[in-house]
Amino acid sequence: MLLKVNGKQAYAYTGGKAFDPALPTVVFSHGAQCDHSVWILQSRYLAHHGYGVLALDLPGHGRSEGPALARVEDIADWVVALLDAAGVTQARIAGHSMGSLIALECAARHPDRVAQIALLATAYPMKVSAELLEATKSNEPVAQDMVNIWSHLAYAQYPNNPGPGFWVIGENLRLMQRQKPGVMHVDFTACNAYAGGAEAAARVRCPALFLLARRDSMTPVRAAQDFAKSIQGSRTVIIEGSGHNMMGEKPDDVLDSLLAFLK
């Protein structure tokens, strides 16, 4: 679905069904150097089981016009502007990695618009190594390889993937390669610079799920567990046998956890 947000074209995948704002709406917010397709399995299921789905291409990503926004706070405001354009009064927001910071800010800045948040593969602060940050600026292919390796368990590097024809690491790399030049540096800089997480967490009043991966090397479990305690009444679920790209490595576990939380 194409929408006009702040005068620019924005794209949201609706899960293979026409979007109905009268249904409970779930917004999916992707991570750095990605787009809506990271959520394809989870979003499609929900769209066919009673939910309205908006899996976003954030500004400058995928089919959404740019530029990519450099501050998490600005992206959160953009998400709410997209809800306005779609005719949605209140939504549940699931965000992965950078997207989790966006979901957090949405709930803190616009509490009347957010009913629940699910923070997947999250951490605060979400600091980026100096080497990776420099690579996103000077050598994107190297940065993409670094992120792809760190985002998956070792099994993803070899042919023994979850199903026939499903090459987790190859698909994730191709997804990153198709984003616009320069977006990767903007995204990782935004994560590294975000300093409002503690204040935002203290302002969250809606139910919150922290969905973490046991073998995550990008946002380790230990980096989120104390953070989770800062949101009153939040729930933490740890997925075993998965790295950072939990939607690709453990799609059913992610879906089951989201369904239990949404209900």
Image: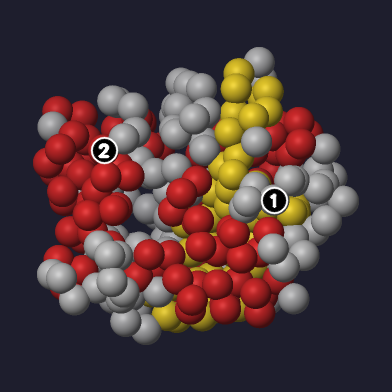
Q: Is residue 142 toward the left or the right of residue 33 in the image?
A: left
Q: Position of residue 254 (x, y in %)?
A: 50, 72
Mark 2 surroundings: few (<14), some (14-19) or many (≥20) residues within 10 A: some
Rendered residue at 50%/56% (across/down): 40
- Farthest residue to the right: give it: 22
Q: Position of residue 62 (x, y in %)?
A: 44, 34
Q: What type is the residue that disc 1 sits on?
A: Lys
Rendered residue at 46%/21% (across/down): 67
Rendered residue at 33%/27% (across/down): 180
Q: Is residue 151 toward the left or the right of residue 112 in the image?
A: left
Q: Quadrant of the C terminus?
A: bottom right
Position of 211 relative to 41 (above/below): below
First-in-chain label (1 vs 2):
1
Q: Nearer the viewer, residue 183 or 3?
A: 3
Q: What type is the residue that disc 2 sits on?
A: Gln
- Secondary structure of residue under mark 2: helix
State the separation of the CA atoms marked 1 and 2: 28 Å
Can the viewer see residue 234? no
- State the count of labels: 2
Question: Which residue in the protein does label 1 denote?
Answer: 17
